[in-house]
Amino acid sequence: MTDTSTRPAEPVGRGHEGVARARILDAASELIYANGIRGTSADRIIEAAGITKVTFYRHFRTKTDLVVAYLERQAELEQGAFLAARVEGDGIRSLQNIAGFIGAASCLPGFRGCAFINAAAETPDAGDPVRSVVEAHRSWMRDFFAATAADAGAPDPEATARRLMMLRDGAMVAGYLGDPDEISATLEEAFRVALGR
């Protein structure tokens, strides 16, 4: 999931190189999320970032390197949002917050579903570095859901985490295709059912 309506602040104290890298990642994040990996050329990113090809390739030797960096940035943002939604020891409240977060994200202009599901759909080779980043993030999310399920008193937190993950994935697709206003309430209800509440 990504918020394409805001751009991260330029890094402070990193000098020209840090600013150039941030500009490349900002442009890549916006373009790849909106148009997909295959639909976004290095030339489009270079133009949007306002940099030279030399500068681009100094920071990212290949497009795969750039896509990996883009997904790592998205993972950091999404994990931060999930951690902010968590209420220690109160799994039900945590899941309510997450359902609200997903519903709100799906209302943002330019929402196109989950950046990680989208990237995986475009990268069929399981050994590709892009798929490794996708799996690392999804593994983090399953662990997060397992801890949240344990907080909610689920008898089998690991099995519950798998269900919660599937519900989250479905909500991301529904948010892109359906009515975002219904996502939060429906997802919260589905989370409760998965917990046996």
Image (cartoon, grey):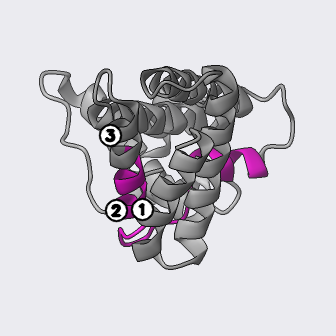
Disc 2, SS? helix
Q: Is residue 2 magenta?
A: no
Residue at image point 52% right, 44% down: 197
Horizontal side, residue 94 vs residue 182: left or right = left
Disc 3, SS? helix
Q: Which residues are magenta?
A: 98-121
Residue 49 visible, this orientation: no
Q: Which residue is mark 2?
A: 104
Among numbered discs 1 and 2, the one appearing first in the sequence: 2
Q: Which residue is mark 3?
A: 93
Residue 146 point in image, percent of width and height: 55, 23
* Three-letter residue code for mark 2: Ala
Which is closer to the viewer, label 3 or label 2? 3
**Residue that sits furthest to the right in the current view:** 125
Residue at image point 27% right, 33% down: 84
Give the spatial CA distance, label 3 vs label 1.
Answer: 13 Å
Disc 1, SS? helix
Q: Are marks 1 and 2 in contact (CB under 8 Å)?
A: yes
* Three-letter residue code for mark 1: Ser
Which is closer to the viewer, label 1 or label 2? 1
Task: State the image quarter where residue 124 is shown.
Answer: top right
Residue at image point 43% right, 59% down: 47
Q: Which residue is more in the foreground, 130 or 42?
A: 130
Numbered badge on residue 184: 1
- How many other residues sit within 10 Å of disc 3, few (<14), some (14-19) or many (≥20)? some
Residue 164 point in image, percent of width and height: 60, 40
Q: Which residue is more in the foreground, 9 or 160?
A: 160
Q: Are marks 3 and 1 in contact (CB under 8 Å)?
A: no
